[in-house]
Image (spheres, rainbow, N blue to C red):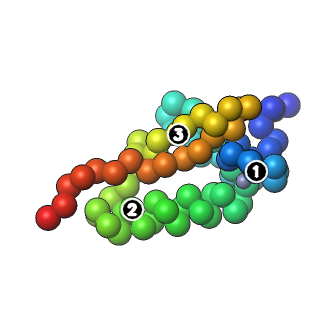
Amino acid sequence: MSDHAICMYDKCSRPSQVIIETGKMQIWLCREHFSQLAYRMARAAENRGSVSLRDLRVVEAGDGKIRIFIRRQAKKK
Ligand SMILES: [Zn+2]
C-alpha cells in the first residue's frame, strides 16, 4: 500500500518498522535507525533537559531519502 516499506534514512535499504510522526511528515525508519535516533534524542534531552519531535531537523538526501539532525538550542549555563 505504501511507498515507504523501506527505511527512509539515507543509504539504508532495510525494511521500515517504526513510523515517527513529526507533525509535518511521517518518517519511516528501520529498527537500527530508530534506535540510533532514540539514542541521540536521549542524549540531547540529557544535555538540555528536554527534547521534542519539533527539535528534529529532517534534511532531504535525494531519492526520497532523508537525514535527521537534532536542532541545537544554544542555551548553556
Ligand atoms: Zn535504516
Residue 16 visible in the current orientation: no
Choose top left, top right, bottom left or bottom right for residue 8.
top right
Please give the label number shown on residue 58.
3
Q: Residue furthest left?
A: 77
In terms of sequence position, does the residue under pointer 3 or pointer 1 come before the other?
Answer: 1
Whole-percent x, y for residue 47 in the image? 32, 67
Residue ID at (81%, 49%)? 13
> What amino acid is found at the position of numbered circle 1 in the picture?
Cys
- For label 2, being within 8 Å of ligand 1 is answered no
**Above or below: residue 27 compared with residue 44:** above
Residue ID at (80%, 44%)? 6
Q: Is residue 11 left or right of residue 34?
A: right
- For label 1, being within 8 Å of ligand 1 is answered yes
Please rate how many residues cluster around mark 2, counting C-alpha atoms within 10 Å: few if below 14, some from 14 to 19, many from 20: some
Question: Which residue is label 2 attached to?
Answer: 44
Quarter of the picture holding the N terminus? top right
Quarter of the picture holding the C terminus? bottom left
Disc 3 vs disc 2: Cβ atoms closer than 8 Å?
A: no
Residue ID at (66%, 57%)? 33
